[in-house]
Every structure is written in structure tokens, then in C-alpha cells.
Amino acid sequence: MTLFSRITFGGLAAAMVLGTGVAFAAEPVLGLAAIDLQNSFFVRMKEAGDTAAKDYGVKSSWQSAEGSLEKQVGIIENFINQKVSAILVDPLDKNALIPVLKKAEAAGIPVVTMGNKVEAGANYSTLYPDYQNMSLVAKALGTTLGGEGEVALLVGTRGNFVSDTREKAFVDTLAKEFPKIKVVGIEPTGWDSAKATNAAQTWLTTYPDLKAIGCISDSLCLAADAVAKAMDHKLLYGGYDGDSEMHPLLESGTMVMDVLTGAYRVGYWNIAVAARLAKGETLPHDLYMPTFFVASDATAEALKAKGVTFEHITPAKAEIEAKNYTAQLGPSVPASAMTVGK
């Protein structure tokens, strides 16, 4: 009779066949330090990420930093001590995390900085074409406004690569191409819908002629729209993420444009990348996810008539693409499917 024993080293389970000399590889454990796990985007990321973990035969441990940089550093320290197979982190501050990420590298643990270009040594960065995408969002919004009016922008946290890049693209594009549009407010929210709600209330009270709000994440636009409706104020929006809740706003033209990364796709993709690294696959250190511009056909035609031409998918098509992650990024596809050109 063959006897099996299961032993645990620092949180990793290793199965060995006793008496035969045959050893089975440990089941990789991925440690994930999220910004938070309350925001709808992060909740969906985890849902699809858990599916990816099952597909790839790994375990995933999701921990919430609850918007605290200090707590995020502590979570990563714990993962290093546990000797996990790979660490994923959505950095609250891309520079402040460099020392602890280098510590993980020294421990031989692959690190994936999600949605951030972090210069920490050998870490991998899962990125998006953020500047180009948010620039087009700003251009579409400015064009729809006729090049005039007051707008505001809801961002994440300063020091976060994604938030900073999207903010810069939005502000740069409006300043360059629409000098008669005034950005009256830029509010860091930490991706907290309650903070977005408070900011929108303040803006709509202070600036009764406010015409539009841009958002670096859809959940912030959704919070702002709830405030605008309650105050009987009509606004236009331009956003990023491709959340399905935005589809009615897109169909009505209230939201001019959205960018589909897709919370489900992002969650699945990051776990897939980390699982492949944990299992020894070779991947480029900078990986780029393909994205889609989402708009109604009517809005796309109206913008085209004003000289803004772009490839788009409708909200109905976006609903399909957002959940097609297993076919796009599952273990049956080659490593090359994990990234596209910048």
C-alpha cells in the first residue's frame, strides 16, 4: 500500500509519496495585496481571479489593505514570511512600496505590480494603454460639450500609476485641445464611492453650471450620477473600466465613452500571469492588456461627424467581451496571449 503524507512549509502545501522517493510539486500559493475588497471593481476582480486560480491549479490568498499604505506593506511582509509562490499587489503608492518589493525579490518570490509601472527591480507590471485611452475619453467629452464649459475629475489616489496617468491624460488633452473648457475640481477618492459622492455634492453646489464629470474608474462616475439625479442636475460622463452598470448611461448618451478593461478580465488576467510565473513560465516584465472603447452607435456617429473617429464596441458587445476571459486568457492558450503590443 502506498502511503501519502501532506506537509506544510510556510503556508505552501507539498505532497510526497513516502517510501517511493517520488515527490509531487507543491501547489503554488499566490498572495494578493488589494487596495480594498469593497469597491465593486475589486470585488469582481476577486471573483474572476478565483476562477483563474481554479483553472490554473493554484491557491490565491486575497488580503485587503483597506486603502492604507502601511497595511499594504504589512500584508506583503507577511506573504514574504509565508514564502508564497508569487505576490500580486495593486500599489497604493508605486514608490513607497519599492523597498518591500525588493525584499520579495531577494527572497526569490516573483512580484506582479497590477496596473502599475513600478521600478522595483525584477517585478512584473500588468499595464494598460492608459494615457492614450483617457486622452480619447477627454477628447470625446470635450467634443460633445462643444469645446466649452466647466468639468471636474474624480481620481483614485495620488502616487498610484494608473490614477496619475489617467489624470494627466485627461487634463493635458482638455488643456491642449479645448482651451475654453475649465477643470474646476480634481478630487482624490481612494476609489471610495462615498468620497466620490461627497465630491460631486460639493461641486454641484459650488458650480451650478458644471457640465460633465470624468472618472478614472466607473464606480466613481456611478456615485456622481446618483448625486446628480437626486439634485435634478444633468451631467455628461466619461469613464474607464467598462462596468456593466454604466451601460444604460452609455445607451442614453449620458456617458459619452467608457473604456473596457473589465474588472473580471483584469482579475482573471493578473492571476493567470502570476500562476504562469509561479510555474516557471517566461513572460515579459511589462505586459499590456487589450482594451475596448465602448459607446453607443449613435454617440460614435455623432463624434465621427465632428472629426473624432475611433473603433468602438456597443454596450451589448462589451457585456460579452467582459466575461470572455477564460477563452482569452486560460491555461490552454500560449504565454504570448498574456500580452499585446504597447
Image: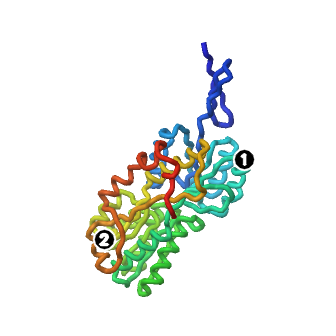
Lateral position of residue 192 relative to residue 140, left or right:
right
Which of the 4 image quadrants contains residue 287? bottom right
SS at mark 2?
A: helix
Asked if one can make out residue 67 in the rendered structure from this viewpoint, the answer is no
Q: Which residue is under mark 2?
A: 300
Residue closest to the far bottom: 180
Please give the name of the residue rendered at 60% of the width and 53% of the height, measured from the top-left corner.
112
**Residue shown at 69%/50% (left/top)?**
104
Asked whether 192 or 128 is in front, the reply is: 128
Amino acid tagged 2: Ala
Residue drawn at (38%, 79%) of the image: 142
**Which residue is drawn at the image coordinates 59% and 35% (left, top)?**
27
| Real-space CA distance between mark 2 and mark 1, rounded to the nearest whole angstrom | 50 Å
- Name the foreground residue: 234 vs 139: 139
Which amino acid, mark 1?
Ala
What residue sits right under mark 1 in the picture?
107
Residue 218 screen position, x and y as percent: 42, 62
Q: Position of residue 186 (x, y in %)?
A: 50, 74
